[in-house]
Amino acid sequence: MSVIEFEDLRDEIINSMDKKHRLEKIYQLYTRGPLAIKYLREVKDILKEDDITVDSCDEFIKKLESSSKNFNKILICIDGSKESFDAADYGINLAKLSNALMIVMHVLPQKIRYAYDDIDAIKPNIPATPIKGVVAISKQEVQMKWFNNIIEKAKKSDVTIQTDIIVATKSVSSEIVDYADKYSVDLIIVGTRGRSGLKRMLLGSVASEVVKYADCPVLIIK
């Protein structure tokens, strides 16, 4: 969820004259996660004469503050899509709020590994070839095109960040889940769709699998 969407929801709450509708939207804001704390406080300050609104905001703020304290390591999965970069932005803000370590990862597809392995199997002693360099080149591209911008944003927010690029030996979702287990991640953040632009692609084949099998909470960013 973008800053503009948070602000729009906040403004809708403030401008609503229907208390039931207002409370429904406050709950909707709460479900957006710890970053909603800032906007719930703004709602509470502006509508301070409305005891029901203030009490509702206070309740949700306490819940969100309590949950965010449990995040020490946050894993963000980047695939080059706008949604994954939105997930990174959300992760930076959440890591700052939680004083957590932010880990940004990308999973290179299996076909890169297969090309690399095939060459080694056929001619294991030959010098590096263009095919052998595919992995290194792919990692450099990910670092330069995607990670460097995220790292810069994280540093501006005083967020500690690590990056990692792995070559898949199985499905992308399995790699993400196993990585989270290996490094004791407290929260995984992923976008809702992949680079294909098909809404069902990432949600069906990756995000839903991560949600299903991960031992830690998973946050899906639309």
Image: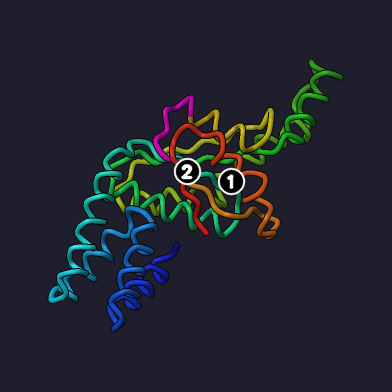
Q: Residue 156 location in percent, x, y?
A: 33, 54
Identify the coloring: rainbow
Q: Residue 39 location in percent, x, y?
A: 28, 66
In this view, the residue farthest toward the front is 20
Q: Residue at x 49, y 55 (%)?
A: 221
Residue annotated with mark 2: 218
Say above or below: 16 vs 163.
below
- Residue segment shown in magenta: 181-187
* Amino acid at dot 1: Ala
Quadrant of res 167: top right
Q: Which mark is residue 207?
A: 1
Q: Does dot 2 land on a helix, a strand or a loop?
A: strand
Q: Residue at x 75, y 27 (%)?
A: 128
In the rendered image, residue 20 lying in the magenta stretch gets the answer no
Q: Quadrant of the N terminus?
A: bottom left
Q: Earlier in the sequence, mark 2 or mark 1?
A: 1
Q: Residue 81 location in percent, x, y?
A: 60, 56
Quadrant of res 112: top right
How packed is label 1: few (under 14 Cα within 10 Å), some, or many (20 or more)? many
Q: Does dot 1 land on a helix, a strand or a loop?
A: helix
Q: Residue 180 location in percent, x, y?
A: 49, 32
Circle 2/circle 1 CB separation < 8 Å: yes
How packed is label 2: few (under 14 Cα within 10 Å), some, or many (20 or more)? many
In this view, the residue farthest toward the right is 122
Q: Is residue 115 left or right of residue 189?
A: right
Say above or below: 56 vs 119.
below
